[in-house]
Amino acid sequence: MVKQKKPNLDVKIGPLNLKNPVLVASGTFGYAQEFKDLIDLKKLGAIVTKTITLKSRQGNLPPRTCETPSGMLNSIGLENPGIDKFIREKLPFFKKLGVPLVVSIAAEETPDEFNVLIKKLEQISLVEAIELNISCPNLKKDKLIAQDAKDTLELVGVARKLTKKCLIVKLSPNVTSIVEIALAAQNAGADALALINTLSGMCINVNQRTPKLGAWVGGLSGPAIRPVAVKMVWEVYNKIKIPIIGMGGIMDIESALEFFIAGAAAVSVGTANFVNSQASLEIITGLQQYMLDNHLQNLSKLTGKLKTCQD
Ligand SMILES: Cc1cc2nc3c(=O)[nH]c(=O)nc-3n(C[C@H](O)[C@H](O)[C@H](O)COP(=O)(O)O)c2cc1C
């Protein structure tokens, strides 16, 4: 019997070369150190940090999370130590890890804060990619940057001029047309898109007649949002050329495969990290097995290969 060649899981996200297409999603994996005794971090395709802002943030009032049917609602409010402390205290852990590091950043007040953050990160070779979180629903703003194509075009255009690193733009599902925003990010020079961030939501304690979250509203994640996320990945894949990092309710290999087939070049594991710390590694081995079983030598044979029912 001829032995089949091991499938190749390499993937290129703009200028970034990953040994496999499985990342961990921003805000669900801390700064990786928190997971060092739980999983073999070196096996991950890349690590995305919790979103960092210019100044430190304490985040929103508790309670900040509550369970929902097939998911969770969170209103963390971007609690983080601020960029300088992050660079001093959190970055050194990544030095010996050898896993590509994606730093997620956001502005609190004005879009100019992105420029200062990018200039600081541009100096650090350990940082291989920057993810612009223009879609956090927990910042008490009337409108997100990712809810306006013109704002997205402008902000990403400025960011593009400031960095040669891989520039990823994270989009919001809380929009009328995600394709319109995706096109704006692509046209402004983004290397890749991360989609989706959480869906805006609210839960009420009926006995007390109070909101379950201290911030009243939050972002819904987990399996409940998966069909929405898969559809958005599929819609965007059909209209844009840059790679998509798909996420939203990925819990296991089957759910990850839905995203690849819909058009994702890579996937990010978020809420699943709270339920099963091994989920991302199980997806990597599951992907290898699926590709072997289906005689797919590399990921380009899987990404976007959705068949019509007549095929
Ligand atoms: C507790 C929690 C905190 C999050 N914090 C961030 C964050 O800081 N920045 C960000 O871009 N996304 C954040 N997200 C969104 C996730 O990265 C991801 O886009 C979303 O949860 C959908 O994926 P999932 O259903 O697999 O969790 C957070 C999600 C959760 C559940």
Image (cartoon, grey):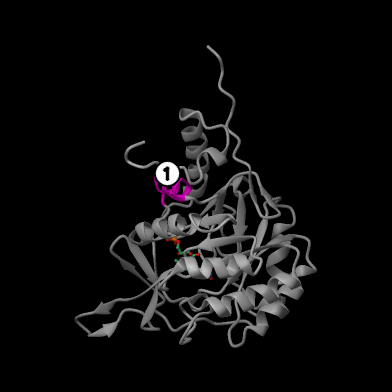
Vertical order, 309 against 116 (above or below) = above
Foreground residue, 210 or 239? 239
- Residue drawn at (53%, 38%) of the image: 301
Q: Position of residue 164 (x, y in %)?
A: 76, 64
Is residue 20 shown above or below 52?
Answer: above
Q: Quadrant of residue 253?
A: top left
The x, y position of residue 74, in whole percent, is: 41, 72
Figure check: 215 above or below 247: below
Rendered residue at 78%/65% (across/down) = 124
Most common SS among magenta residues: helix
Q: Amino acid at mark 1?
A: Leu
Residue 81 in view? no
Considering depth in this image, is 47 or 89 the residue closer to the camera? 47
Label count reads: 1
Taking the spot 50% from the left edge, 29% from the top edge, the residue there is 292
Crowd band around label 1 with a 10 angstrom C-alpha radius: few (<14), some (14–19), many (20+): some
Percent x, y of residue 229: 41, 60
Residue at the farthest left position: 207
User: Which region of the structure is painted magenta?
Assistant: 251-262
- Residue at position x 44%, y 58% in the image: 235
Residue that carries the numbered disc 1 in the rendered image: 306
Q: From where the camera sits, is residue 162 visible? A: yes
Magenta residue check for 258: yes
Measured from the top left, where is residue 117 in percent x and y? 70, 76
Q: Is residue 162 magenta?
A: no
Q: Secondary structure at mark 1?
A: loop
Relative horizontal placement of residue 231, taking residue 153 as reference (left or right): left
- Name the image quarter holding residue 123: bottom right
> Which residue occupies the foreground of this view, 1 or 302?
302
Judged left or right of residue 230, residue 193 is right
